[in-house]
Image: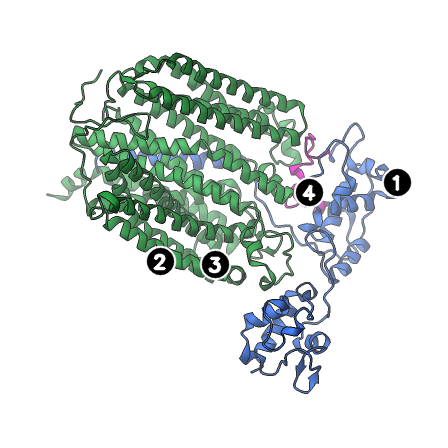
Chain colours: A green, B blue
Amino acid sequence: MNVKDLLLERKGWIVALLAVGGMLLLAFPLVAQYSVPEYGDDFPLIGSRAAVWIAAQVHLMFAAFVLGVPMFAVIAEAVSIFGKQDRYDRLAKEFTRLLLVAYSATALWGGLLLFLLTTLYPTLWSYLAEIFGASMWVYAGLFFIESATLYTYYYTWERWKRGRAKLFHWGLGILLNVWGTTVMFIANSWLTYMTSPPADVTPDTAPGMVQFWSAFANATWMPINIHRLIANAVFGGAIVAAYAAYRFLKAKTPEERAHYDWMGYVGNLIAIGVFLVLPFAGYWLGREIYEYNQQMGITMMGGFMSWLWIVQAFLIGVLFLAANYYLWIGLGRIPGGERFAPYTKYMLVVLVLGFIVWATPHSMIATRDELAAMGGTHHPFLGVLGLMSAKNTAVNLMILTTFLSFLMYRRANKIPTVSWARTGTISQGTILAVASIVVLFYGVYGYFVPTIVRIGFSVYQVLIVLFTIVAVLVIDVLIARGADTRGPIRWGQMPERSQYALFVIVVTFTWLMGLMGFARSGIRQHWHIWEVMRDTSPHAATPALGYAAQVISVCVILFLLMIAFVFWIGGLIEKPQLVPQETEDTDAAELGPGYEPSLQPATGD
Amino acid sequence: MSSVDLKIVLVTVITIAAYTLVANIIPQVQSDVPEDIAFGADVTSEELVDAGRSLYEGAGGCLACHTEAGGARGPNLLTGHDGEGAIGERCEDRIADLDCKDYLFRALVDPGAYVVEGYPPIMPPTDRTLTTPQVWAIVAYLESLGGEVTVTGDDLAQAEEETAQPAAAPNGEQAAAPAVATDDAEAILQDLCLMCHQMGDRGTEMGPSFDEVGARLTASEIRTKILHPDQLISEGYEPLAGVMPSNFGSQLTATQLESIVQYLSALR
């Protein structure tokens, strides 16, 4: 083969490499233009802050992966044990295999972060080590135990496959999650201490004087723990879905397509399902930040970071649209799904309107000249939609709409047989309608009350939405008992474009994680430890969003490139065995719908 | 690479590029570090006002709440509030017995005491993040908004003097003065510790001797014994538990504490 033929054969790779290389080339000068002239040569090219930032962020992305996927695996294994559905067992094992490689990457980036901190910010590190030294040893010890548990969990999969041994094996999976969560909680205490040290710690307080537990269990520790726990599950699900999408697109047989179509559905279901409760954890975290320090809260929401939430709204809008798009396309492979198709355009309208409202700026920090040019801090008419009342209303309605999409998906191929099915369906509709009215009522009423009262309204909106999700789902599960079917789901008969939606979702989640990392860290502004230890380095100023976005994009690209490598190398270890035929009675009301590729060859509509 | 791989790469790159682009086309606001102000007694009003404006619109973070359009968080100081004009015009009459300059200064460092009716008491004391000269510069800027600037170099000089005194605690209250005004370990030991402990032929034989204490205890243990004396009582001294004051943590600066710890650790 001559060079020309080789180039032609590999043209796809060459174009892709050029695209990625081009982005990196574009990124470096952009980063450099901010960093080199100002920051000198403390770290080559990008400066100390960007070096630590990238190492920390990529480490966190891998950490989220290795904490999120075990949650996914242990739930899937539980379904396989208690639901007697073997395909979930293979699904769990397939992902645990990927963890083996991902653990190493997590540790490598963690080690790099540690070395960067100790060499570039030794004073800060010494200070933290003096307070948290004991917990750092526990952290390292737990990492050993966690790794040993992981290896045991994976390599005993086939040996402990039946009877009590299988339950014991599942117990190992639970232990893996316990160790991982504990490790995360410990590390969270260090970083949350930097944001919210106890009020009695002052710049003159020697680290040895700081009480360990008050530093460990500081004001934002538990809100961050819960927020990250939920976000990790979301991230794990999204990665699983993207992996399945890739395999689906590469599949060569109907069985493979069916398997990975189903896997993508399950991953996305977990990602989006858990994602719906993430904003509530975010509210709690935001509230704790305000409670801890009003100034920090105002800096976060109304100060120099106010524009960050507009970018966040843009990303979350994309997530909602992509997730619903995937579900709506999926209705096409479910017998009976077509009867819901006419409603999707109205749901799209709600989502787009919600997106627009959420992305409406209001009370942005601006100079006098800018304010004069704008004629105020916000648009005289549209600016009204920028208030939290409107935004909370919009996001809650988007959550309810997405939940409705999921509900349609569940009901598509079922013919309820319970005597109260009609009453139950009317009850579901009534609950959803009442919830929407309550959300709208508090949204409008919020304009007529003081700010402090308005903030409280968001809690009522959240509670009614959570109640609605739980109540409607419970009714739906009960209605589906013993239901007849309009036909099995035709797994594998999914248009290819749907799979790209799963890629958009995982890239967006990853980027969003980077953005929120910047928000959490950036609200400290020029303090290493809020109002205790100043950042006296040349990097003390907190950069604008444009620069932050470039660093975040570099982190996302690095992570995705490496996770692609992890998937590739993981695929070399062992090829997953597809289920030739499933005979058990499956129920779409549970985690995943029935999977019968060989019984249901692709027949189309 | 197949066309599928290529499409995946393109979808990924386009998605990332879109987010990066959006974040770059919105207004770019950087959070600067408040610049130290080092004006002498001959500083002009213009210099103070310029420095104050820079802080007000930038690192001071004032614009987050006190905008020209007003809002729910704080009154409009720039152009007028309730038809009363800019803050420089109305500050003189805001509180009886307080002239404009003093009112503004106090309202900045103790805002909870001067909340304007109808607004929530959410403003943090400005001197938690700004130095006193920086606060005076903001006062000068606010005075300049419709009024006469009365802040002078003398106010800054006085602030410098006060800064040289024990630093203000971050909560806005004056920090407790150190028990001694030196970082020299021997001097601190002489003034504070040897009233109860013995070192060589000096001090009082009440608590454990400091002789060769570095061989008996680690630096961490010495630190703990100073800060939390009842947590680590030397053998044979249990009856004296509770006698040693437990407030050295607030009486000593961090430097003084470490100075003593290092000194005692070296006694082997």
Q: Nearer the viewer, residue A224 or A421?
A: A421
Picture layout, residue A262 above or below residue B58? above
Picture layout, residue B231 above or below residue B124? below
Mark 2 — on which chain does it sit? A
Res. A42 visible in picture: no
Q: Residues within 10 Å of mark 4 (few under 14, many from 20)?
A: many
Residue type, label 4: Tyr
User: Residue B96 shows which numbered tag?
Assistant: 1
For residue B110, side relative to residue A459 (left or right): right
The magenta stretch is B50-76
The CA distance from mark 4 to mark 1 is 26 Å
Residue A565 percent coordinates (x, y) = 27, 46
- Badge 2 marks a residue whose secondary structure is helix
Location of the C terminus of chain B by quadrant is bottom right
Residue where numbered disc 2 is placed: A144
Picture layout, residue A277 above or below residue A475? below
Mark 3 — on which chain does it sit? A
For residue A235, side relative to residue B211 (left or right): left
**Same-subunit check for callouts 3 and 4:** no
Task: Tell whether label 1 touches label 2 (CB within 8 Å).
Answer: no
**Same-subunit check for callouts 4 and 1:** yes
Q: Nearer the viewer, mark 4 or mark 1?
A: 1
Q: Nearer the viewer, mark 4 or mark 2?
A: 2
The CA distance from mark 3 to mark 1 is 55 Å
Task: Tell whether label 2 touches label 4 (CB within 8 Å).
Answer: no
Residue where numbered disc 4 is placed: B56
Residue type, label 3: Ser
User: Residue A135 shows which numbered tag?
Assistant: 3
Asked whether A21 falls inside the magenta stretch, the response is no
Q: Nearer the viewer, mark 2 or mark 1?
A: 2
For residue A524, side relative to residue B45 (left or right): left
